[in-house]
């Protein structure tokens, strides 16, 4: 398992929230497919993204109680676009080393 940086966590959360307005527990569950992330790790990320204006929150009734939902803002979409560009470049550089591309040429 490789450690996940704060920037990569931000990018992953923004990507998940860009797909649908969702709540913290579901984001944690969705993240589990790629990384072991606990709710105690995720909620500070959500607060930071909200504080920077990348996410907005709203409350929605669910089974008789309110649940806090997150939605991505225009700023969050712009940040996600840049994260995707940066990730693509980073992934290519790492793949070139790990897959020994020069030795295969």
Image (cartoon, helix red, strand yellow):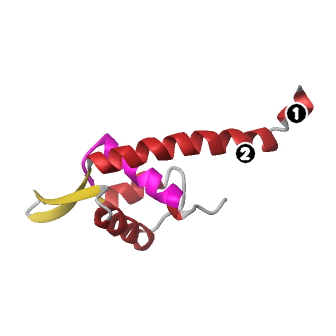
- Left-right relation of 17 to 96: left
Q: CA distance from mark 1 to mark 2?
A: 13 Å
Image quadrant occupied by the N terminus: bottom right
Q: Check if residue 17 falls in the magenta segment.
A: yes
At x 47%, y 44%, the residue is 82
Which residue bears the numbered disc 1?
A: 102
State the image quarter where residue 52 is shown. bottom left
- Which mark identifies residue 9? none
Which residue bears the numbered disc 2?
A: 94
Residue 88 position, x and y percent, is 59, 39
User: In the displayed image of the protein, which residue is found farthest to the top?
Assistant: 105
Image quadrant occupied by the C terminus: top right
Badge 2 density bin: few <14, some 14–19, many ≥20, Cα 10 Å: few
Residue 56 position, x and y percent, is 23, 57
- Left-right relation of 56 to 90: left
Q: Please give the range of residues in magenta.
A: 7-22
State the image quarter where residue 91 is shown. top right
Residue 78 position, x and y percent, is 37, 44
Residue 15 visible in image: no
The total of numbered circles placed on residues is 2
Identify which residue, 69 or 29, lies in the foreground: 69
Residue 19 visible in image: yes
User: In the displayed image of the protein, which residue is found farthest to the right?
Assistant: 103
At x 45%, y 68%, the residue is 38
Q: Check if residue 33 falls in the magenta segment.
A: no
Badge 1 density bin: few <14, some 14–19, many ≥20, Cα 10 Å: few
- Left-right relation of 33 to 89: left
At mark 2, the secondary structure is helix
Residue 46 position, x and y percent, is 34, 64
At x 40%, y 49%, the residue is 79
């Amino acid at each position: 398992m490789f450690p996940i940086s704060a920037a990569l966590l931000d990018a992953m959360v923004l990507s998940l929230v860009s797909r649908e307005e969702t709540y913290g527990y579901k984001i944690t569950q969705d993240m589990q497919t790629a990384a072991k992330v606990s709710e105690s790790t995720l909620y500070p990320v959500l607060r930071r993204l909200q504080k920077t204006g990348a996410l907005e929150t709203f409350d929605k009734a669910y089974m008789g109680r309110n649940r806090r939902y997150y939605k991505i803002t225009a700023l969050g979409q712009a940040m996600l676009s840049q994260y995707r560009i940066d990730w693509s470049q980073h992934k290519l550089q790492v793949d070139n080393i790990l897959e020994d591309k020069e030795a295969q040429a």
